[in-house]
Image (cartoon, rainbow, N blue to C red):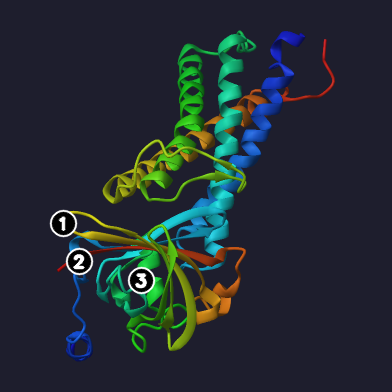
């Protein structure tokens, strides 16, 4: 919690000078979601994370100045079944007692046209950081704008599912991650 | 003994295929669900489900065949209660070989795991994900299975009794051997 508060404070300082006509920076947690799916014995399993903190600043007029950060509480996982939820906490998966959260911090956002953007950033999971390239679609709305993104993560790049679970014939290496962040503009 | 005292070859083949698959997948089901979560457990669950759906397909054929073909009559000397018991046990066996894999399929859907037969043919989820319903169906699946076990013991016991103790050529009814005349 302290970490989140510190991050929020830092974020506020960093972003206080940036002011523009339409700037999205108030994330609406109730309308935001992070989900994933993966293949297990050839069967698609869906899951997600219920608790996460998303912070962002986005001005369509100045996309290169946009920033986003998402902190995910790994204990809030829905991995498809209670048995899998429990298993995911273990040393072979998230090793959650040592690495309780995952974090994504954007480094560069590039407009692709047509309200589509390419967001680069660092994903840190289980103590390992990898640069990810995430396509994001921006949908302006009356009450809130919606930012939809999806990318494929290779779980073994982060040591998620080690030992006996490294067998990708049973649980696939590729995990499709999808997120929807709703934010209000000013 | 004439050929009328033998089930038709399709019925015999389906009977023994089903018997073999049930004798493999019943103990597999009992064994696998006690295991801690591991890749092997996930594999065994898949194999169990694939065999179960195979049983459902073969059992459907078996029941359709049974409905459209008359089975060989029971020996003349058989007493009334045994005839009734035979009918009841066979009727229940036909119901269970359909109901058990069906309950497993529904359970799997309710627990949020679609069944993909041999990893190739996805079966529709007839019901949505619902934990309470999934737990209930797991109970139903287990109760039906142990009912089947009891009935199979009766079924095999009765066949052996008629064959060996009463010296009736009972086992030939489900055999594929040379025709006796």
Of the two numbered discs 3 and 1 on the same chain, state the one appearing first in sequence: 3
Residue located 60% across and 44% down the image: B23
Quick check: A19 left or right of A58? Answer: left
Please identify the quarter of the rendering in which residue A150 is found: bottom left
Q: Chain of mark 2?
A: A
SS of the residue under disc 2: helix
Residue placed under numbered mark 1 in the picture:
A143
> Mark 1 — on which chain does it sit?
A
Q: CA distance from mark 1 to mark 2?
A: 14 Å
- Label disc, if present, on residue A31 of the rendered structure: none
When asked about the image quadrant of residue B58, the answer is: top right
- One can see residue B169 in this view: no
Where residue B4 sits: x, y (%)? Answer: 71, 8
Circle nearer the N terminus (2, 3): 2
SS of the residue under disc 1: loop
Badge 3: chain ID: A
Number of other residues with Cα within 10 Å of mark 1, as a class: few under 14, some 14 to 19, many 20 or more: few
Residue matched to label 2: A29
Quarter of the picture containing the C terminus of chain A is bottom left
Badge 1 and badge 2 both on one subunit? yes
């Amino acid at each position: 919690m302290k970490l989140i508060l510190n991050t929020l404070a830092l974020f506020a300082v960093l972003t206080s000078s940036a002011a523009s006509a339409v700037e999205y920076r108030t994330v609406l947690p109730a309308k935001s979601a992070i989900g994933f799916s993966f293949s297990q014995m050839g069967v698609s399993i869906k899951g997600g994370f219920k608790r996460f903190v998303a912070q962002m600043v986005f001005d369509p007029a100045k996309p290169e100045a946009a920033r986003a950060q998402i902190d995910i509480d790994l204990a809030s996982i829905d991995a498809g079944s209670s048995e899998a939820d429990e298993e995911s906490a273990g040393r072979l998966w998230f090793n959650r007692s040592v690495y309780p959260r995952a974090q994504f911090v954007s480094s560069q956002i590039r407009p692709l046209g047509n309200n589509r953007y390419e967001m680069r950033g660092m994903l840190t999971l289980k103590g390992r950081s990898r640069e990810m390239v995430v396509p994001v679609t921006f949908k302006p709305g009356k009450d809130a704008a919606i930012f939809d993104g999806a990318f494929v993560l290779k779980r073994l790049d982060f040591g998620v599912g080690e030992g006996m679970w490294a067998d990708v014939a049973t649980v696939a290496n590729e995990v499709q991650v999808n997120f929807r962040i709703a934010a209000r503009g000013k | 003994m004439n050929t009328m005292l033998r089930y038709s070859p399709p019925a015999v083949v389906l009977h023994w295929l089903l018997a073999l698959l049930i004798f493999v997948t019943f103990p597999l089901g009992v064994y696998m669900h006690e295991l801690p979560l591991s890749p092997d457990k996930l594999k065994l669950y898949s194999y169990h489900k694939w065999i179960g759906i195979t049983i459902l397909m073969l059992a459907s054929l078996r029941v359709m065949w049974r409905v459209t073909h008359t089975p060989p009559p029971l020996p003349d000397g058989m007493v009334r209660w045994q005839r009734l018991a035979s009918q009841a046990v066979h009727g229940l066996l036909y119901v269970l070989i359909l109901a058990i894999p069906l309950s497993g399929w529904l359970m799997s859907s309710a627990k949020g795991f679609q069944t993909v037969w041999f990893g190739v043919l996805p079966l529709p989820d007839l019901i949505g994900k619902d934990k309470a319903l999934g737990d209930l169906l797991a109970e139903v699946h287990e109760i039906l299975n142990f009912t089947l076990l009891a009935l199979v013991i009766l079924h095999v016991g009765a066949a052996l009794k008629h064959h060996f103790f009463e010296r009736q050529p009972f086992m030939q009814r489900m055999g594929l051997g040379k025709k006796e005349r």
